[in-house]
Amino acid sequence: MISKKDIEQKIIKLRIELEKHRFLYHVEDKTIISDELYDSLLRELDTLEKKYPEFDNEMSPTHRVGGEVLDSFVKVQHSVRQWSYDNVFSFDELKEWEEKVLRILEKSDIQKKPTYVAELKIDGLKVVLTYENGVLVRAATRGDGIVGEDITQNIKTVRSIPTFLSEPITMTVIGEAWISQTELEKINKERAILGEQLYANTRNLAAGTLRQLDSQVVANRKIQLFVYDIEGLEYISTQQEELELLRRLGFQVNKESKTVKTIQEIESVYQTWASKKNNQEYGIDGVVVKINELDLCRELGYTAKAPRFGIAYKFPAEEVTTVLEDIVFQVGRTGIVTPVAVLTPVLVYGSLVSRATLHNSDEIERLNLRIGDTVVLRKAGDVIPQIIKAIETLRPAGAKKFTMPIVCPSCDQPLSHKKDNTDTSVGIFCINNTCPAKEYQKFVYIVSKKAFNIEGFGPKIVEYFLSLGLIKKIPDIFTLSREQIKGLEGFGEKSADNLIESISRAKQISFARFIYSLGIVGVGEETSKDIARSFQSIAEFRNATQSDFDVIYGIGDKITKEILLWLKDSSNQTYLDEILSHIRIVYETEKYTSTHLASKTFVLTGSLTQMSREEAKKEIISRGGKVTSSVTKKTSYIVVGADPGSKLADAERLGTIVLDEKAFVELLS
């Protein structure tokens, strides 16, 4: 008689055998058994699991067939923020990106020159896979980069994705889901017969498939996933090693990646695939360029929107023609008046487009636009649509040359090519401080997620409350009462309570987010964080001088000029007095693990071995210290790693205390 232990061993062996053939088929493009034999093994395993349910396991290959129907997708927070790369569309722009990268590394005293990995940019849906001890525990869409949707049940039906790994690794894996052109054509034929809407491209099909609530539908479509990134493993030193590890662990990795030494070699890869992209089963919309050395990637870090260590070199975008019906104007919170093209709606790159920004008067002049023109519209992926040119041979008779307005479309006050007291600009500005459109945009900015994050206080509520006179200036938000809101259109007792509670929570705000909320030109999320780390209080920030900003890494002369202009404006100082009477700022000092480095200023130079420079910076800040980019008389210590740059000589000249990495680690403890 066969024992239970023998049955269990048989089940384990069947799973291993099926996993081996999954890997060979989806990763190695090899087939050593027929589909019929594979299905026979799968049926045998399924029979045993049903007969002996105590040995069943949700990671088994039998659970890939789908069948579970969800009521809705659950929102989940990513353990690691998901970024999108910035785009370039020409070799000149690629060179500018490289020059910027090299400047940052040089400024950081990094002497090592980077190499690059060129990977095909797959036009699909980004998927985030989380493995714990080698087992797939969650799959999610990118969402907004912070919160996505849980699509684990659907992803389990995708056979190119291992549900368990050959090594007990805990990590996050990033990939791009796609469906072949052949499958798209097949599915669209079926939908056409049923009178259903067709999918515009393979990307839309992949996205629509993975958001199906019935996982059986997903199982019946041949979704595949190319993976290209790992988060959570510290022992890997290059991007190429990451790709090799992913292949070894059983993932499907696109085989066309290439490690190169120069961007000229990248251009060669780009041109090769620009001519081949339309002949592939999967969509390709460019080449992703990444710095290969991960220590350099960590040093470069991120902007508020994207990694600095990589760029998407996009292929020429999809172009269509449409009619320019009108040009209207939007007034931003800084007063800039932006012309916007109103277009006859047209489908481009899978989405319906009816508007496109025209940037400024110089752009309209360059394009030589007229109302009624047939224009060429370009859109690439998620990039904002752009008018490339007008087809002048199709211009209607009597079409007049367009002229920019001389008064604000919102307040009828004269427009200027100068914002405040700054230099003349190609843009035009409304300089009326009481312009309704400017005030509206300021309110929308203040209540937004990255600023005070007042839930339930969206643009429509802002517009409604402004029209009622409930809010006239920003501090009025924090004096709103339940009695004022309850009974208004759209507000019952519960919704009024919810909004007041959101406002109450927002009264406590981090220093970095408060700086961001001020809306100073050029001061985004990352710059706001740098400022918050560099000043001990809002009072210190209000009294800052040029020299205070000169030593802050990442803040150049242009941004410093904007900050100082903002601080010198008496109306801004009055605003600070008013808003600070209603809120409480939470400073970084309240989160320090210790304060034994308080009042100490550090400069880092060279490559560290025990931690990245970014990690060293965080360790210093968490203990109350400051990190600056240049050595001055105020510098307390310079931390010297391998291959230090000119900052060491500056420190020796000024008599600054020099710490090697060992001494630095001891100082931290």
Image (spheres, rainbow, N blue to C red):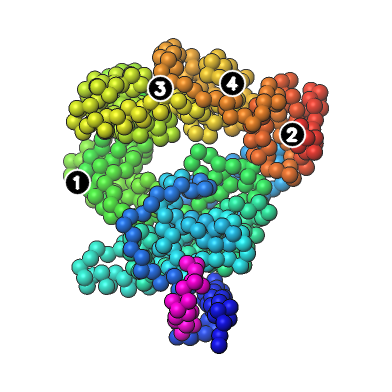
Q: Amino acid at mark 1?
A: Pro
Q: Position of residue 120 (x, y in %)?
A: 51, 60
Return the residue at label 3. Answer: 419
Q: Amino acid at mark 4?
A: Gln
| Cα–Cα gap, marks 4 and 3 | 31 Å
Work out whether mark 1 precedes mark 2 in sequence or the reverse, and give the earlier one. Answer: 1
Residue for point 80% across, 27% down: 657
Helix, strand or loop at mark 2: loop
Going from N to C along the chain, the mark reached first, 1 or 4, is: 1
* Highlighted magenta segment, given as a residue range: 40-60
- Is residue 513 among what the camera can see? yes
Residue at x-position 63% and y-position 53%: 233
Is mark 3 in CB contact (under 8 Å) with mark 1? no
Question: Would you say residue 251 sits in the magenta stretch?
Answer: no
Q: Position of residue 482 (x, y in %)?
A: 27, 24
The kind of secondary structure the magenta stretch mainly shows is helix
User: How many angstroms separate mark 1 from mark 4 (CA)?
Assistant: 62 Å
Q: CA distance from mark 3 to mark 1?
A: 37 Å
**Mark 4 vs mark 3: which is more N-terminal?**
3
Label 1: which residue? 396
Of residues 49 and 256, the one drawn nearer to the viewer in this rendering: 49
- Which x, y percent locates residue 442? 36, 26
Instruction: Give me the disc on residue 536.
Output: 4
